[in-house]
Amino acid sequence: MFSVIFEQYNYAVVIILMMTGLYVVFASRNLIKKLVGLSLFQTSVFLLYITIGKVSGGQPPIIVETHGGDHALLEPVLVAAAAPNDAAAYAGQSDILYSNPLPHVLILTAIVVGVATLAIGLALVVRIREVYGTIEEDGINALDYHYNLEGTDE
Amino acid sequence: MDLLSLFPAWLLEQGPAFVIVLPLLMGAITAILPSRTSAWWVCLIVTLLCTVTSFGLLLQVYSEGTSVYTMGGWDPPHGISLVLDVLSAPVLLLIAAMAVVTTVYAMPSTIAEIEPKKRAPFYAAFLLCFAGLMGMVVTGDAFNVFVFLEVSSISTYALVAMGAARDRRALAAAYNYLILGSIGATFFVIGLGFMFMETGTLNMADMSRILAELDGGSRVAKVGFGFIIIGLGLKLAMFPLHTWLPGAYAYAPTKVTVFLASTATKAALYLLFRFTFTVFDPSYDYVIVVLTYLLTGVGVVGMVFASLQAIFQTDARRTLAYSSVAQVGYMLLGIGLATAAGIAAGYLHLLNHAIIKGGLFLAMGAFWYRFGITRLSDFNGLSKTMPWTMGAFMISGLSLIGVPFTAGFVSKVNLTIAAADKGWWWAVAIIVVTSVLAIIYIGRILLAAYFGSPPEIDGEVVKRNEAPLMMLVPMWAMALLSIAIGSNILDLGDFFVTASERAAALLVGSGA
Amino acid sequence: MRDPHVILRVISKFLIPFIALYAFYVQFHGDFGPGGGFQAGVILAASVILYALIFGLEAAKKAFPPSWIRIGMTLGVLLYGGTGVLTWILGADFLSYGVLAEKSYHGQHYGIIAVELGILFAVTSVMIAIFYAFGSRQPEPEAEDW
């Protein structure tokens, strides 16, 4: 039973990271710690995608220079992409096994999104700290208790 | 089509990309504009152009069928494609039109709510959010959905936080929204990861085709489906996952509240339609189980609980926010029915509710603008001090309840009939019960406004002080539209009903 | 006055130009191998951030004025979008680089270079913007907060 887990340890790592992140988000009352948990949670997804992209025995998805020339690198790719069903177009590069680059590209985007979210989150925490003087959720709720009962600020 | 020939061919051909690119680029330019009025003008012109384009695209889709646009000339499934069909085109037009309405309204409201030097960034963030929502609806690529979802969400967090100038609780609300929204988006992207494992593609049409070949796919597809449903559920405020919504709606600047209430959750709902019926299909056993037991269940429970919560709020904006959660329940019930009539009713309620809730929040913003009130107890005598605003509020409120000759009535009746057709009489009963609850929470406000007398300040009765014209026009447009749909004036009612039926036909037809 | 950070300052003064240079290597090598605007932008921003860490925010703001940030962000987005608009003007679909030159793959090449340059501008200025935004806040930490 354990051998299954060890053979697919990458998924185990993903799950552990994911659950740790989620737990931190929900369990901590400190706004910064919640953001830490959120980042951990998002990172686990990056790992999941990288795992998907790996083709066993495949090498990094950078075109290997098989023959010289100026556009020899670019041309077959473009031809292949333009006519995906044309088997002949793939002929020149079929002998090399590449890992799937698509998940990497996706994750690059997701990382940028994660950074943007984190930046906005931290900026919000800074503002909350300036306005409330605390970054503990309980403290904020206590400060707003009166307002929440009244229903308005005025 | 006669109208269609009025649009330039280029616009129709490149329209799907145009409606995303234009607000995105102009949003970037708006950020460095020196004056706030120019930012407003840019925002208005961009949203207007997008509305006109979306209208043209809608007509095109109706006359010529589904259109696929290839980004950068790379054919799907390898390239990113933008797909417009009868399901997405009406939502696209709705988002663009609501953007125009809120922008017109924003001229006076932002002056009261946003500090001068933050106004240009405010409009820039709004345009980004707008571009993201348009992208979510138009794109035919599943991962692209996530990107646009996050573009719109991240700018929404910033926009909600800008409400801090008038109420500091906006900060905490924006933070909560950020945490839950990010978790939702991350769940969605985990689901996409599993779907990519299963099918090896990210193009929605391709994914659907491969899934059908695999006859619903293995356990990986089921897990992926679960993650996608939960992720979207967080974004669209499905009942137990709705906790971010009341705060975000209540404390955001009015323009943002209106725009969020009428478009953001609707775009997420559109995605739910898209994923459950187009990418996946109710004929797979796990999908129909989720639809029948999960979505219907949380929809119905949400309708009752959120309506009850709405009744016990002291802040009128929170009342409306909880009512939004309840209304999402109606749409989920429509999806859960999984019959053509049910889907059509859910979709129709999606469109109608955007108009109704938009009108209500617009009026609510005007009350705050003039008197700074949001508390229910302050509504006494508002019909005398702001008769026109209160009038618009009343019409939209009645429409929310579902009084005959209003938009809410049409969609609720359709939903009831659809539920009865399927033999779900308990659902019919719950629709009636929640409508009664809606009468209570809207009625409380209306009673205070119409039968209370204006308060006295320093021994003087508060004088009549109507909202500015630029606020009145949008809210009356919403109110009149609501009546027009309900009473079928200018055939608008038929137009909406037909739109929803065509969307439902596409969804149900695509499965079998 | 003896400078307690003399080693840091001398080393980083020596390093910063190389970091920036490496950023440009990553940028312009991006169409042959791994690299591109995102990575290059972050590396370039890291050089400015290192400068700010060692010599102070004020000095960094003289070297890279905050007013450049908005311009950089906008310029980046406009370069990216502008490439797409250019392909529109040339009569193709959005971001069809192929029409930018006579031969399709030349066009792809030019298009990618323009787009990556846009990403470089945008990413650099955004990273620096985030750093400036948090760095220039006046902290008032109290004992019990930590």
Image (cartoon, coloured by chain):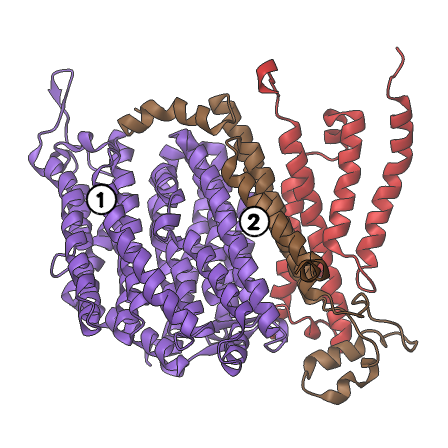
Look at the numbered discs 2 and 1 and tell me whether their residues touch, using CB distance below 8 Å: no
From the image, state the color of chain C. Answer: red
Residue at the extreme front of the image, as rendered: A1
**Marks 2, 1: nearer the viewer:** 1
Residue B482 shows up from this direction? yes
Residue B173 in the figure: left or right of residue B495:
right
Percent x, y of residue A126: 55, 29
For mark 2, give the secondary structure: helix
- Report which quarter residue C80 is drawn in: bottom right
According to the image, label 2 marks what residue? B29
Percent x, y of residue A106: 64, 61
Residue C54 in the figure: left or right of residue B476:
right
Which residue corresponds to the image point at 18% horizontal and 49% vertical from the top-left? B397
**For residue C89, above or below residue C123:** below
The three-letter amino acid code for the residue at tag 1 is Leu
Quarter holding the N terminus of chain B? bottom left
Which residue corresponds to the image point at 82% horizontal and 57% vertical from the top-left? C28
Residue neighbourhood size for the residue with mark 2, other residues' Cα within 10 Å, grouped as few (<14), some (14–19), many (≥20): many
Residue B202 in the figure: left or right of residue C64:
left
Residue at the extreme left of the image, as rendered: B451
The three-letter amino acid code for the residue at tag 2 is Ile
Percent x, y of residue C16: 85, 37
The chain in purple: B
- Report which quarter residue B196 is drawn in: bottom right
Q: CA distance from mark 2 to mark 1?
A: 45 Å
According to the image, label 1 marks what residue? B308
**For residue A65, above or below residue C10:** below
Ranked by sequence position, the earlier of labels 2 and 1 is 2
The chain in brown: A
Label 2 resides on the chain identified as: B
Residue neighbourhood size for the residue with mark 1, other residues' Cα within 10 Å, grouped as few (<14), some (14–19), many (≥20): many
